[in-house]
Image (spheres, grey):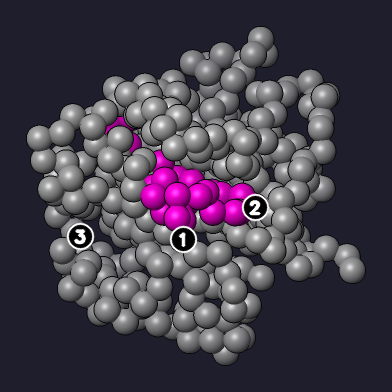
């Protein structure tokens, strides 16, 4: 089963000094995991200033000895704990793990192209990855992270490009059990507007259909949508649930403008619990949280709430806006449950 950890450079100093500190911390963690017969599966790297930090990262021992040896995503989303660089590390004690893949645009790809043209190119690259000999690869589910610069201004353009590419190739995510987190983020390429990470869960893994919940309590947040917000995958005796960071629709009970980040975080966590319950999974089965905050000044309140409510579940909090610009916080998570024989 997979295990997650969040590693950050807690020392102060230059970015290089922090990478050296994180290299030692990562080495110690990997050594301890190896003693338990666990190995690195993939790493997600969050940088505070990716355009000025990426080249330094590639020159570091951290990159050469660890990050370059496994699938690794590097994205510009500032860790709000002040570390400048944080890692979400996935390890496992099994051999055949679904791997993280990434799709990026190069400098040549973005040269002279507007947002729509860039998005078309990105999605065509992505679709090319999931097709083989002009046929869509068979898979049980897919987890996608779609990153956008200036998301408020670009999201409608990017969505149109996605629809156009899907229509061209006959790829319909709503029929393919695809859970998508659409969030603000940048790459190291100047002028690049979009980027994408994904995990494909291939056969013999089997999709799990969530229980249909008509009544979700007095303070139900948003209508349940298994196609775009979550996927459940069963392989062997393990159930994995991926829950994307979703927009909160308060309905008649709440006004987003009247909720601070801490209050909304509490409501989102309650709603996450309801969504997980539809897979017969509880909050105790969550392995990690990824939290996206619009305003960095909300970090202490949200971090304190998560640390108190779930002290044993790692979480990383980064600065990023979601598709709903009025919502100050978005939360995604992954959960595992061992099934009875």
Question: Which residue is labeled 1 in the image?
Answer: 100
Query: Where does the C terminus fall, quadrant-wise?
Result: bottom right
Which residue is at a point 57% across and 25% down the rendered structure image? 248
Magenta stretch? 126-152
Query: Label 3's element?
Result: helix
Observer able to see residue 317? no
80 to 72, vertically: above or below: above
Query: Label 1's element?
Result: strand
Between the residue at mark 1 and the residue at mark 2, the CA separation in whole angstroms equals 15 Å
Check disc 1: other Cα within 10 Å, few if <14, some if 14-19, many if 20+.
some
Outermost residue, top side? 252
Outermost residue, right side? 341
> Where does residue 338 sit, x and y in percent of width and height?
78, 65
> Where does residue 23 sit, x and y in percent of width and height?
32, 77
Q: Is residue 180 left or right of residue 299?
A: right
Earlier-in-chain disc, 1 versus 2: 1
Q: Does the magenta stretch include residue 132?
A: yes
Between the residue at mark 2 and the residue at mark 3, the CA separation in whole angstroms equals 34 Å
Question: Which residue is labeled 3 in the image?
Answer: 54
């Amino acid at each position: 089963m997979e295990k997650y950890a969040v590693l950050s450079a807690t020392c102060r100093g230059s970015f290089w000094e922090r990478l050296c500190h994180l290299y030692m911390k990562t080495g110690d963690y990997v050594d301890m995991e190896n003693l338990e017969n666990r190995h690195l599966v993939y790493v997600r790297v969050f940088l505070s200033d990716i355009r000025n930090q990426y080249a330094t990262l590639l020159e570091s021992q951290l990159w050469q000895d660890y990050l370059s040896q496994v699938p690794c995503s590097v994205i510009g989303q500032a860790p709000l704990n002040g570390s400048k660089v944080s890692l979400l590390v996935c390890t496992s004690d099994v051999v055949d793990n679904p791997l993280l893949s990434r799709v990026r645009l190069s400098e040549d790809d973005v040269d002279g192209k507007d947002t729509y043209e860039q998005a078309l190119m990105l999605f065509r690259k992505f679709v090319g990855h999931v097709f083989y000999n002009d046929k869509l690869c068979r898979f049980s589910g897919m987890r996608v992270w779609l990153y956008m610069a200036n998301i408020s201004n670009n999201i409608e353009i990017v969505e149109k490009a996605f629809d156009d590419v899907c229509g061209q190739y006959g790829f319909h995510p709503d029929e393919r059990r695809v859970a998508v987190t659409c969030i603000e983020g940048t790459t190291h390429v100047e002028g690049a507007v979009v980027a994408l990470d994904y995990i494909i869960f291939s056969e013999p893994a089997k999709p799990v259909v969530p229980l249909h919940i008509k009544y979700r309590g007095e303070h139900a947040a948003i209508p349940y949508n298994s196609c775009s917000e979550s996927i459940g995958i069963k392989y062997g005796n393990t159930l994995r649930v991926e829950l994307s960071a979703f927009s909160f629709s308060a309905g008649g009970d709440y006004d987003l403008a009247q909720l601070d980040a801490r209050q909304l975080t509490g409501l989102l966590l309650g709603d996450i619990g309801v969504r997980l319950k539809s897979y017969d999974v509880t909050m105790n089965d969550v392995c990690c949280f990824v939290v996206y905050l619009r305003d960095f000044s909300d970090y202490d309140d949200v971090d304190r709430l998560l640390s108190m409510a779930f002290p044993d579940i790692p979480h990383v909090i980064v600065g990023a806006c979601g598709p709903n610009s009025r919502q100050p916080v978005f939360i995604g998570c992954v959960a595992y449950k061992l099934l009875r024989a």
